[in-house]
Image (cartoon, helix red, strand yellow):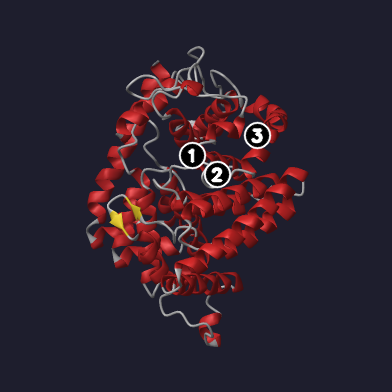
Amino acid sequence: MESRKAEEWASQLQCWSLQLINCFAFKPEFLPVICRRDFLSGLPGMWGGLVNETSPAGVGLLRTICHQKPGRPAVAECPGVVESLCNIARSSDDWQCMAVDCLIWLLQDTDTRFKVLDRAAVALLDLVDLPSLGEHKRVGELITSVLLQNYNPFPSAEVASKYSPATKSILDSLALFRKKMKWERNVPKEDLQIKQAAALVVKLEGNARFSSGDIQGAASKYSEALALCPLRAKKERVVLHSNRAQCHLMLRNPKDAISDTTRALCLHNPVNRHGKSLWRRAQAYEILGLAKESLLDAIMFINECSQAPEGDSELKQNRVPEYVEKLVKKQMQASWLFKPSLQKHGGIQYENDYADDFREEEDEEEDEDEGSEWETASDDDSEDDADDKKDHGAHEWDSKDDDRKIIRSKPSVVFKGLTLHDIIGSHNKNSK
């Protein structure tokens, strides 16, 4: 209890300090002092945690800095900060919208645009289907227009030298995406239905390849189906992106998996609430060693699975799957506020050390769940949401009380006195 209280107070003091600095950041004369490279580099890692989730903390200060023209060059000169903003923009962080704001302002500024374009384009491309984000409306359209600002399919040698060939390919694909959207508005509905039917046939071929063990072939078929599928067929595209993400995970391509799951979450209605994609992105971030992003996606995945329709008898007497709980415990340890200090001063002692056995058991769990994942790849768009519970068939869920808290077989310590029951309960209360 004492260690938990100490962590809460330390986090609160950090948030208060950042809020005070944030007040000074509104004054341009203080920006040179605040925008020191070593200080900016640490800001993305300063977050309120699960106990102070109402504080924007480090990303809030970065937003204030990026909102002012004198502050943007300093942020653009820190590749690590820009990379972190890209990760937050494609996560379940409550302050995702602030990270998107920062990236958009950096791209709109001609002085910083080409310094961040290579990194920002990769992340923002996955958000072009985002209809809204918090109070922001038509976010995807804004992102598209900002990325294609002064776009020229045949740029001069001087302009082309300012960004990589990969970024040029991203901009070209985005221009084709916008052209396809305009084209679909003027095409007869019957033609779009034919294309959607063709995409379904190709998707079924991908499902068959996935079931036979040809994962690379399945991914190729899902890509082919996405090229055929109309942009308006959002439910079908959610399934295709999510299934291709599963292929990327099995092929150990976590970055591609993050891209596909993010696009699926943007297309899903409601936004960022597709359970399978949340879990797959949590696994992808875990592979990349991004503990906070993996943790937040895993918690959101648990929340989505716990919010089952009332009266669903199949979901009674269910508990949080052990493999999900283990990932949450591991990432809570990895993102612990005091971890850097304890590493510096000689080792970390956890109340329950799950880091060692998690990797050993992961392969076994993967084999056990492999069958259900393969079944998932054969779900169609009308079945995907209804069959989320089949994604890991050996595990089931329940949500009985008004607070949508997770029912577990026994209360166990997740991290320094904070239980998984506490996390989900407080998170759901704040999300209502």
Residue 384, x across and y down, in percent = 53, 42
First in residue order: circle 2 vs circle 3: 2
Along the line of sight, the residue nearer the viewer: 198 or 252: 198
Q: Is residue 418 visible?
A: no
Q: Is residue 250 left or right of residue 121?
A: right
Give the distance between the C-alpha atoms of the residues marked 2 and 1, in whole angstroms.
7 Å
Residue 398, x across and y down, in percent = 46, 22
Provide the residue designation for mark 1. 297
Along the line of sight, the residue nearer the viewer: 234 or 55: 234
Q: Is residue 397 left or right of residue 110?
A: right
Q: Which residue is at 64% across, 56% downward?
A: 201
Provide the residue designation for mark 3. 372
Give the distance between the C-alpha atoms of the residues marked 2 and 3, in whole angstroms.
17 Å
First in residue order: circle 2 vs circle 1: 2
Tag 3: residue type?
Answer: Ser
First in residue order: circle 1 vs circle 3: 1
Give the secondary structure at mark 2.
Answer: helix
Which disc is residue 120 wearing? Answer: none
Q: Are marks 2 and 1 in contact (CB under 8 Å)?
A: yes
Q: Are marks 1 and 3 in contact (CB under 8 Å)?
A: no
Along the line of sight, the residue nearer the viewer: 286 or 73: 286
Provide the residue designation for mark 2. 281
Residue 245, x across and y down, in percent = 61, 49
Residue 326, x across and y down, in percent = 57, 26
Residue 404, above or below 207: above
